[in-house]
Image (spheres, helix red, strand yellow):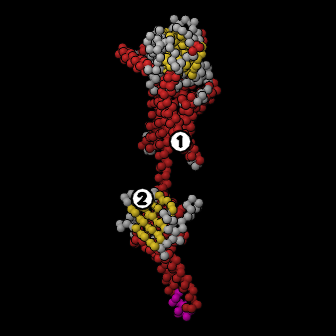
Amino acid sequence: MALGLLYELGCGLIKDRHTMNPNQRRREGIQGGGSFLALMLFFFSFSSHATAEQTPTWAWRVGDDPAWAHTDHDDADWLQGETPERLLLLRYPYRAWYRFHFTLPEARPEGGWGIALGRIQTADEVYLNGVLIGGEGRVDNHFVDALHKKRVYALPDACLRPGVNILAIRVQSTFLVGGLVSESIALGDYRMLEKAAENEAAPRKQMEAFFLGMLAVAFLFWILFIIYRVHQSEYIYLGAVVALFMGTCTLESLLWYDAGGATPFTQRLTTSLYLLHPIPLLLYSARLFHGVRPPYLHYAWAGLSIGLSVLFLSLGGLDTVRAVEAVWWLSLMITGGLLLWQAWRLRIWRQAAIPLTLAIGMTLLLILALSDALIHARMAPSLPFDFLLYVGFACLIVSLVVAMTIRVRGMNERLLTLSEQILTAQETAAARTAAALHNELAPGLAAAKLDLQLFLRRHQLLPEGEHLVGQLSEAIDQTRTLSHEMHPGAVDQLGLQNALQALSERLATAQGWTLHVDLPEEEPLVGTRATLLYRMGQELLYNAAKYAHASAVDVQLVSNRRGMRLTVRDNGKGCDLRNTQPGIGWTSICERTEAMHGHCYFCLAPGGGMEANIWIPHH
């Protein structure tokens, strides 16, 4: 008696043999023989001594009759062969039956007998000698698709018979073509077959988990947009697309089926969510192409999608899903075609990167969706079901995220440029005001002081008017101080590093600091940026003098090809950065730094005290 636990019944990809030429049939035969030999050798090492008494055969017929599950049914007039065929299920009841005649070896494997049927399109019931032993999906009017699962069923010992056994498989498809879609169908040790199916499904589960995780991250980012009151319609539409796609992918995933979540209601809900996918795209396109006629087409197709979704969620059933699916595909094609046509008509990719990104994403979705539909029509099992459609939607979502990122980045750049322009304008105005104070008001006050002194001496009123002269002298000093603070002339006259050197030495002498200054020899910055950086260094040194109670201060200015970093460090008492409310000085420093496309941070210095770092680019 020969050893074996397995009958190899598939040969490569299940294809329509009526469309094959002789060379293709020979290649299919070679592939089938190779897979047969490889699979026999694989199971040989796990098998016990057993003998196959006859070659198993298949019989199949389109239609539905519960009596076809019985062992006494005569299937002689059915289509028959050594491998099952795909079946066209074009009319009600959209079901068909397979009958598999086989004889088992005498020796029972350790894990019991089992059969691996591979993937079935889309639901099935399996009977062994007239007894229902399992099924995936639901074969009735309230259907449940089980598109992704590999069917492995145990053959109970109580149902097995000596000699010929009959396995009857009732299949149902929501699509035009259905039935067994497998590279191989195998009899053998149930535990080994189940483990092999689990190993084969593991990469898909990992892919689904990763994909759903990425969608969840995108959805959380959208929630953050809403929390921070970014209520522009573009972000709302993006969140709607992500939410709908995440919902449908979750309900269609193998993880959901394994968790037992597939029910008739969730199946209807999944299809209803699919029907809603074009709506946010249509609404976004209506906004993007505002003013293009006729705009009511966008809203008409959006309303149609909502109506189809509500209709299917209410009715369900195979007849409804087949009718709705055709309309949904038409809606999706029209949506994408309308977007691309309007994009081409307006030549918007010449104006901005955002419409071009969206056009690329929609083009990829249409191409991959059409490819997925063609693969389904051929029932090719080489790709997971709906894989290309999922990838197409993923490309569209990525394009939306990229478009929104480009927009946010552009807005931020415009805001920073505007802030820098405002600071430049403020410095220009401050320089003009400082020049007026220094060159006009201060000399006028000085002349008024001299005239007052001459008047007081001429009328011998000098002692009585001394306080007026003092007030004028104080006003002159305040005017000059205010002029210097509004626009420090030392930066223009001495340069940034010399001005910082002079300021640091003056404050060190007044405060009794031990000063260490490290400044570059060459002039690092000029113009407005030099003045702003000097102001920020001035603010840091004044804060150290007023609050730090330090005995030593370090000032460092480092310049490289990208930008410049100013560091002011003291050994004073420091502060609790986590519980301290930022003052006006710190806030103004941070705002000015950001306006110049730089960054700043404050930290505790080694050994105590504070350290402030400011970095700004050269341009």
Residue beneath the point at 51% across and 71% down: 550
The residue lying toward the viewer, choosing from 373 and 163, is: 163
Q: Position of residue 18 (x, y in %)?
A: 42, 14
In which quadrant of the rendered image does the C terminus lie? bottom left
Q: Is residue 265 visible?
A: yes
Indicate whether 562 appears above or below 343.
below
* Residue ID for mark 1: 217
Out of 77 and 4, give the one closest to the viewer. 4
Q: Which mark is residue 617?
A: 2
The N terminus lies in which quarter of the figure? top left
Q: Is residue 564 above or below residue 516?
A: above
Marks 1 and 2, how far apart in space?
A: 33 Å
Residue 392 visible to an observer of this rendering: no
The residue type indicated by label 1 comes to: Val
Q: Mark 1, mark 2: which one is toward the viewer? A: 1
Predominant secondary structure, magenta span: helix
Disc assigned to residue 493: none
Q: Amino acid at mark 2?
A: Pro
Q: Residue at x 46, y 11 (%)?
A: 51
Q: Which residues are magenta?
A: 452-461
**Residue 96 drawn at (x, y percent):** 54, 14
Along the polypeptide, which appears first: circle 1 or circle 2? Answer: 1
Judged from the image, the secondary structure of the residue bearing numbered disc 1 is helix
Question: How many numbered marks does the figure carry?
Answer: 2
Residue furthest toward the bottom?
Answer: 460
Question: Dividing the picture into quarters, in which one does residue 63 lie?
Answer: top right
- Where 439 sits versus 271, above or below? below
Check residue 341 for magenta coloring.
Answer: no
